[in-house]
Image (cartoon, coloured by chain):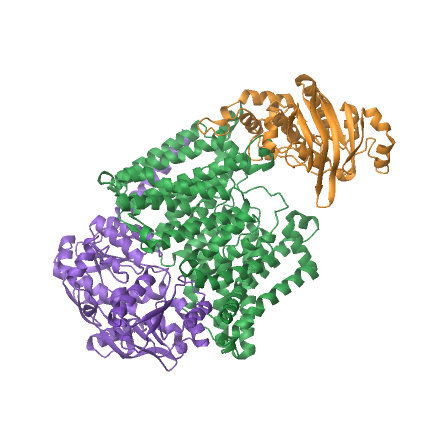
Chain colours: A purple, B green, C orange
Amino acid sequence: MVRVSGYVRSTLAAVTAAVAVAAGPAQAADTIKVGEINSYTALPAFTEPYKKGWELALEQINAAGGVNGAKIEVISKDDAGKPGDAVTAANELVSREGVDLLMGTFFSHIGLAVADYAKQRQVFFVAAEPLTDAIVWQKGNDYTFRLRPSVYMQANMLADEAAKLPAKRWATVAPNYEYGTSAVAAFKEALTARRPDIQWVEEQWPPQGKIDAGSVVQALARSEPEAIFNVTFGPDLIKLVREGTTRGLFEGREVVSLLTGEPEYIDPLGAETPEGWIVTGYPWDKIDTPEHKAFLDAYQAKFNDYPRLGSIVGYATMMSVGEILKKAGSTETPALIEAAKGIAVATPLGPITYRAVDHQSTLGAFVGRTAVVDGKGTMVDFEYRDGADYLPPPDEVRLLRATN
Amino acid sequence: MDFLFVQFLNGLASASSLFLVASGLSIIFGVTRIVNFAHGAFYMLGAYIAYTLTQHLTGVVGFWTALLLAALIVAALGALIEMTLLRRIYDAPELFQLLATFGLTLMVEDLVVMIWGPMELLGPRAPGLEGAVPVFGQLFPAYDFVLIALGPVVLGGLWLLFKKTRWGVLVRAATQDRTMVSALGVNQSWLFTSVFALGIFLAALGGAVQIPREAVHHMMDLQIIVEVFVVVVIGGLGNVFGAFLAAVIISELNAFGILLFPKISLVLVFLVMAVVLVVRPHGLLGKAESDSRPAIGTAIEPFRRFGTRGRNAMVAVLLGLALVPLFAGNYLMSVGTELLIFALFAASLHLMMGVGGMVSFGHAAYFGLGAYGAGLLVKYLGAPMEAALVAGPVLAVAGAILFGWFCVRLSGVYLAMLTLAFAQIVWSIMFQWYDVTGGDNGILGIWPSRWASDPMVFYYVTLALCAACIYAIRRIVFSPFGYAVRGCRDSVMRAESIGIDRQRIQWLAFTLAGTFAGIAGTLYAYLKGSVFPDVVGIPTSVDGLVMVLLGGLQTVGGPIVGAAAYKALSIWMTSQIDFWKLVLGALIVVLVIAFPEGIAGFWQRRVSPLFRRSETEEEAIP
Amino acid sequence: MTALVVQDLRKSFGGVEAAKGITFTVAESELLALIGPNGAGKSTCFNMLNGQLKPDSGSIKLFGQEIVGKRPREVWRMGVGRTFQITATFGSMTVIENVQMALLSHHRRLRAMIPFAGDLYRDEAWELLELVGMADQAGRACGTLAYGDLKRLELAIALANQPRVLLMDEPTAGMAPRERVQLMQLTADIVRARGVSVLFTEHDMDVVFTHADRVMVLNRGELIAQGSPQEVRNNSDVQSIYLGSGALYGAEPAMEASA
């Protein structure tokens, strides 16, 4: 009997512990809880600035009295770079922490997984960083809104510039997954529409993170293109740049490159940044608008660091959430959705709206050329392109979403 | 022609780092039998430390000194880890060391971010070798010539070391037959430490020489480790020449593969590995192992059926699990559901690995096929959950039948690597066959039917299925078939000589293990509502291994305990701790040292006898 | 009737001929010893007899049925049991489970997944263990047994499918002298009681000359003598081979304990 009571005692202890955990922290009535998920351990280079961005925005919103009299509280979770873990985190936030809405994610597939969870559990979700077109179009749903300019939008911005170049023979290099393939497809379509005379002479599809840069450069050079469209980023981009520079691939050739002007990707290149590439990006130290200046000052004061594009995304996402909550006047999901449709939000890059038709924000990007100044990579001759100008008309989008 | 020659040179240049790292891994495995999962982490550390040193040591001499110094520092670190950690667990069952090195890898991944920050770091180019040399009119980086020479130089150096020094002779002897070394009166621990340090030195050097070519970042380890295993296995374990040959083959394959098959470059190396292993079961230059080591999972203590008390305890556990929804909220129930699914996944892996002695590095294939089976049924046929739960695992069964047929023809680490190759092939199909599988954007909308959409109902569905499957696995273990499977593991010779058809029995066991993993995968798809290629990925397979080893290979219940412990810890830590990899890795290392038999093994051998003595005596009566 | 007819068995490895046309027969219920110095080809011969090695040429007929070309498990099903020089048992199972396994295989129940194997053929296994004197250790893990006990267990396993021919590779190696006598006496009893033919190799000449009905001597892949123990003992060729080692008369060959 002694042993039996031992079982009972340990079972009771386990039950008590579990109940304590299950009950969770008590919820204060005057806070609005926002659940936030991102790939903090898998992609710290991008997600740390992003986190600082939303932290700054959160501080500002709450300092200004919160929304509708309530303070916003953000509960942030790591998804370890795995969609399954992201769904677990979303579930924890919704079921246990009782958050009123979700925001975040970086990877496209994780964004899609959380978006689908949001649809299933009828939770409002603002996808911050995923670039895939599918999240608002083919697989878009009522509950999901997305901030960042998509692959389609950025490829079209670049195609505008590329069309002005004399180059007719084009080669492409892109990582071998959905982001790469859709970026190349969108760019090809956009550029061919603008310049029917263009020839596509070579495609390289290095595996993401495993580029065999010397061989890829060699293969690109062999096709003797006049211009190259690049979609690789991060460590792959660095290898490509080093090999390409050493081997003279970029000499006398135009290069159009997606995202390369973002500090996350251009800063590690430092003095080796290739000059004259046409890129999308974020020249944080050269933007003169008052709204950006205010953001920059506040950011540097708080973190003693300069912002990356992730900081803008984090800040704008949080601000969007704040505005949506304000407009909705409620934390009920249908109210949030209604409020978010067509809402205007002020961001450091200027005012944006979330289109009612596909829930895509009109946040744009800077398009310019790369340069090296004082041993650092930066952008010159840049111009802000409003995302609204690069989105397909509502009718087309409705068709895309209808197949969903 | 000129172009092809330069492309060939490109391949050779890439081969050299791969060879350095692979030869280190191969030497370590040959002597100590450690499957060093942390080898990639040491490669990465070599690159990081070389980066830091080159910031201070400049000029030609400074640069090369920095690279060498970095490799030496990491080698010293390796020796320290060998002496303080690995030495304690050499006597643990084979592969258990894999768990320790997995923990180390997790720790290192977080540590480098803490020390060097999350941004990619671009080291200097080699002084004097920044430029390019024209080769047949094509510019070829001067530094790459150094790399091309480095491989053969290191190979020659190793050859001299092994042929001409007493130490080298001992290493070769130990590679062939470990028992011989102790018979020769050699200080074995010193030999192991020095071998480990040499292997780590080579890995770190391989990382250090990469800094003029690529950025240093915190995911370098994962990018190289799998390819390194492939090289070691294709070359033949413990064979340095084989590693060189395989490194060249793989690198040339990558260099020319992008020209011939640009879209399937991901899977090419694994296809080649699968073909090599099917044709040559011990790699290109490897030999069958002479020393007849017991297969993994061979236990000193036989598996025991539950006595009355054990059965009662199990009924109590099941009742306890059935009562969970009374006090757990939706989130905890979902976590509980996930734990149950992974308990089944781990149990299925254990059926193959612990019971069958067939180590799998690619068990995720069947888990993933089960998940995709459900996903595809939903996507194309709009199948309801009830139908998908039944039909989903069929894809896993088919995969297990097909792959198992090849795998059971091999044994040991070769078998394990072939399972990995098949898993990677499945992964590539899921990742790249965009039109059918949705590629990396996966398949969405795999949610339970309305009646089961409540987390509590789905918890009960999962509990019922997993409990039934785990019970079935247990019954199988103690059935005549289970005996035959264990027999094939314990002694192939004895099994064959009492009429057991080893390959058929193992094939059937493989298929069953795949089936149960598939059922777990199908449930997982419904739990998450979506399927992505990562369910087939290497991390999923590694998670399975960690669960089984952590719980204890030598007990039937071990993997279930291991799955619950590991999954609960990692879910909790991911949610609550910023540097969770560091903490989780450290915890795994501590557990490895504290429980070298696994958690359940520890329980069974140390704790349980304390209050079960009377019962075992009862049972001993026939 | 003749149990086993072996004719002109040949096998070479690389350039080395390990069997140069071996021909012999084993009668029913006969205890036949195969002796010879190290490297004479005894193990090669055994491995060919149970199908582990395929001979280059020659034939082996078991009660008139050809067994060359068959796998070990098929040869076993035809009634040839085997014990190994270095014992091969299922180390992680108990003693009785080892025997039950052989019985399960014999009764072709290996793919059954429902019943508990531990409950099947327990009495038969128990009887076999009693026969070899291992019943008192039935519940022990095989991996913890003494060497001599493993040998006896192997004998029990080998008897499980009621073999007609038993191949025993050095059945008493590594045993204490008293154990050897016991085991060989046991073997002899079984041969007589069950009508089994036994072919065994052995280094201990006491064992050979005490228990064998007939002795064959193998040297460098050739049979150089066969006959009754007395005839072989007096054969001059045999004496010359063993000369110097002194092994023919009793003394244990020093280097042989291959445990």
The residue sitting at the top extreme is C193
Percent x, y of residue B108: 46, 60
Q: Please, is residue B141 above or below residue C51 in the view?
A: below
Q: Please, is residue C133 above or below residue B380 in the view?
A: above
Percent x, y of residue B606: 51, 39
Residue C160 falls in image quadrant: top right
Asked whether residue B188 appears in the rendered view, the answer is yes
Residue at 43 percent of width and 51 percent of height: B425
- Say which of B326 and A319 sits in front: A319
Residue at 70 percent of width and 26 percent of height: C5
Asked whether residue A31 appears in the rendered view, the answer is no
- Say which of B417 and B114 sits in front: B417
Percent x, y of residue A224: 40, 73
- Say which of B52 and C212 sits in front: C212
Q: Quadrant of the N terminus of chain C?
A: top right
Residue B388 falls in image quadrant: top left
Percent x, y of residue A113: 28, 53
Residue A239 falls in image quadrant: bottom left
Q: How many marks do you count on the picture?
A: 0
Residue at 55 percent of width and 48 percent of height: B279
**In-image side of C203 versus B607 (left or right):** right
Q: Please, is residue B322 above or below residue A159 in the view?
A: above
Q: Quadrant of the C terminus of chain C?
A: top right
**In-image side of B513 versus A70 (left or right):** right
**In-image side of A373 versus A243 (left or right):** left
The residue sitting at the bottom extreme is A374
